[in-house]
Image: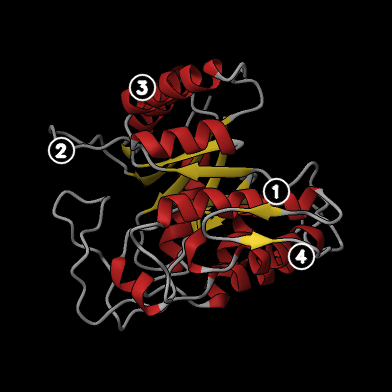
Amino acid sequence: MKYGVILPNVGPLAHIESLVQIARRAEDLGYDGLFLSDHIAIPAELRSAYPYRSDGRFPLTAADRILEPVTTLSYLAAMTTRLRLGFSVLVLPYRHPVLDAKMLGTLDVISNGRLIVGAGVGWMAEEFAALDSDFDARGAVTDEHIAVLKAYWTEPTPEVHGDHYSVAGLGMAPTPVSKPHPPIWTGGISPPALRRAAGLADGWHGVRQSPEDVSRVIGRIAELRGSRGESMEGFTISLRAGLEVTDDAFAGSSRTPLRGSPEQVAADLAEYAQAGLDYLVVEPRAATPEQLIDQLERFTSVQRP
């Protein structure tokens, strides 16, 4: 299994000096990649329900800091040498696919092929409205967006015509260093999201799923790919999950995976590996950069698959 780190480019720790400090320490500790979240602006009155908390409450407000992920990841590319650089996840409908093809392709070039394009459809209707993007059509828009990215990254003069985008007659150079193109991991567990991952992506990127959930997702994606005559070989199963390594064991039924003593976390990792997880992206619980780095250091001492 490979291991990446979520850097806090949103929220109170979103200062570039802190992100560089964390990224360099993660590289020294042997982590495989670093990943950023994607938001542009948070509405003062948020009504959309956050899908990754049971109460639907989003943990950020309009006053919180946000460092735009493509720009920030480009800076971090220059501050690191080995780490893969990814998004968890980039909301594709927020940007035009031709512009995304150029920006992300450039990022892959300047990082010498280290880009991983985690891609999603988004959930915050108010942010879509602010960007003049169609919230209701976001799934279909994302599918066409991926088609445009692949075309511009692999064809000299691509031509893609769909219901939402129509592009032709333009070339784009240089092409990415990654061949045939930077890997695309799509997120989500809904039926359309799993069809998107199976049919259009190079991997799946989940959020806070249990080992049992991961196993079910793998089974469904394998079934969908099998119906297309494709195996799971080369397809990456990845997961973003909170991390809190504690001195003592965490007792009680409220414990979530990767929260507890080194022995508890090691057991969780073994279950994820048995479920078929290829790449775990940890999101340490921390109030300061120092606490975040301490969690990364503690995690390296945990027995890992």
Give the spatial CA distance, label 2 vs label 3: 22 Å
Q: Secondary structure at mark 4?
A: helix
Element at label 3: helix
Q: CA distance from mark 4 to mark 2?
A: 44 Å
Q: Which residue is mark 3?
A: 216
- Please give left or right for residue 270 compared with residue 169 in the image: left
Q: Residue 301, can we see it?
A: no
Q: Is residue 111 above or below residue 221?
A: below
- Of circles 4 and 2, the one toward us is 4
Q: Tell how many labels.
A: 4
**Disc on the earlier residue, 4 or 2:** 4
Mark 3 belongs to which amino acid?
Arg
Answer few, some or many: residues within 10 Å of disc 3's Cα (few below 14, many 20 plus, some between 14 and 19).
some
Are circles 4 and 2 on residues that touch, CB within 8 Å?
no
- N-term mark: 3 or 1: 1
Mark 3 vs mark 1, CA separation in Å: 28 Å
